[in-house]
Image (cartoon, rainbow, N blue to C red):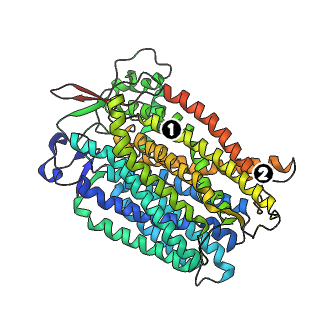
Amino acid sequence: MERSAGGVSRNGEHGKPNKKSKAKGGWNAAIFIIFVETTLRFAFYGLAGNLIVYLTTELGQGVAEAAKNVNTWVGISFLFPIFGALVADSFMGRFKTIILSCVIYLVGTILLTLSVSIVPTHYREPVFFTGLYILAIGEGAHLPCVQTFAADQFDESSLEEKKAKSSFFNWWFLGIVFGASAAILIVIYVEDRVGWTAGFSITSVAIALSLGVFLVGINRYREQIPVGSPITKMVQVFVAAARKWRIKESYGVYDKNEGFATLLSTDQFRYFLLIKYYRYLNNATLLDDVDITSTCRRKWRLCSVNQVEEVKLVIRLIPIWLSCLMFSAAMVQIHTFFTKQASTMTRSIGAHFILPPAFLQSLVGLAIFISVSVYDLVFVPFARKITGHPSGITVLQRIGVGLFLSILCMVISALIESKRISTAKYCNLMDTPKVAVPIRVWWLLPQHVISGIAEMFTIVGLQEIFYDQMPEGMRSFGAAAYMSVIGVGSFINNIIISIVQTISSKHGDKWLIDNLNRAHLDYFYWVMAGLGTLNLCIYIWISRGFVYKKVHFNSTEDEEMEL
């Protein structure tokens, strides 16, 4: 396995790749990593997709409480990647972190399997939640590394591999969707019809298989060497700028390239063109009397131009991150209230076969599968001819389309829920929640399909922007940042549920109660649609002022690129 630092091969002089490095990476390596991610998504969604059913039926939790528990677990699972990224970038590297995450993941799934099989009933709940959050730790170590590690297999200095990487994000997400959909069709069906022990056992086998396959491809990978904590380098800039906020006279700027996200596997080196925003941080690069008289650079009072520009790149992404949180808060309904809605509706096919409540989640995956294929093979070539943009539309436009579709999803969900409640009222089933309402579960199909298309636009867009627009040495952290959108969005959904419950209880009955026929889930969806609309307006305002990262290549052919 080839190892490199900041994208620079150890075996190449000045970042120039040797013949050995050319034989590694590319799709021949990425395909192994995609398989690993597919099997881990299979295991994760085999648990997440049916978790609310287990909590309400086996552990006896109420609908609102179970939804909060699911959101909390999902939130922590997608916030832990921040710590996983720091470990990978600072100490272990992405390859070793992925191996460790698979082992932790396996321990968690085994513990979950034991909790529903041989563990005594009175110990079942604490053991179950212990295994659940051990799995969350494994998820946190795995998520920020595996996608970045796969994308690292494509050399940005090669035009052919750069084009391949552009499609990689679409097909990567497709692999995730395939694993999640297979989990809904196989694992959740087994959990519903055979038993929880058999279902959780399948997830343990999947994790063991993914670890084995990942190790098989070890000689094909390009590996990045840890470059140090990105958080430390960011804090150094803020501290250095603060210490010189009153500087009146300087002796120039510190413009030394230090190898942190500045070198590539090529005979060129590149540096970021100066960003005109956040100029206050430029003080960190100014040389004062103390710097001139020091025998060595003090990292907490003097930073290079490139280090400061890297911090600016990260700051630019914060408003985009904030404006996507409502998207995640809306989409988490797929694993909670969408599933509970399905459990109250007619799900029979023929005389003997009954669909599991979470079955429609597989149609989210099918919608993503079809939309990714159409987007990559039809829409992008067509839009490219019109706009001239290599990707057809910009990544921010792509994210914005997904935000709009998430609002449309909530509106349709509210209308369909109103239809379900009116049917229950017409059939005098308002106080008999265990009797299926005579309305087919297929009425929920539109909201699931729109959810899938929305995720194809926004989630893939977030993956791309938090990879391409981050400094190279912080790309694991960038992956963690985009995943934390899902985590924080889950917690925001919890907050919204709590606020809705508190306000509605002061003006009558709570909107979200165990008997969905008497609940007002449709009102809740309208609230989510309203908040999403407000959020979309803010996003459009933010995106209009966003400036994409520009990189300058210093070579015989002076070249500037916008990434």
Left or right: where does residue 268 sit relative to residue 101? left
Q: Disc 2 marks which residue?
A: 501
Which class describes the residues within 10 Å of circle 1: few (<14), some (14-19), or many (20+)?
some
Residue farthest toward the left in the current orientation of the protein: 19
- Eyeballing the image, is 540 above or below 37? above
Which disc is residue 401 wearing?
A: 1
The residue at the point 69 percent across, 80 percent down is 122
In this orientation, does residue 158 appear? no
Residue 84, quarter of the rendered image: bottom left
Place of residue 343 in the rendered image (x, y in percent of width and height, measured from the top left): 66, 66
If you read the primary sequence from the N terminus, does the residue marked by circle 2 or circle 1 appear first? 1
Query: What is the C-alpha distance between the residues marked 2 and 1?
Result: 31 Å
Counting from the top left corner in percent of width and height, residue 441 is at: 63, 62
Q: Is residue 346 visible?
A: yes
Closest to the camera, between mark 2 and mark 1, is 1
Q: Residue at x 38, y 40 (%)?
A: 379
| The N terminus: image quadrant | bottom left
Q: Secondary structure at mark 2?
A: helix
Q: Is residue 164 found left or right of 119 in the rendered image? A: left
Indicate whether 159 appears above or below 434.
above
Q: 90 or 490: nearer the eye?
A: 490
Depth check, front residue: 499 or 339? 339
**Kind of residue indicated by mark 2:** Gln
SS label for mark 1 = helix
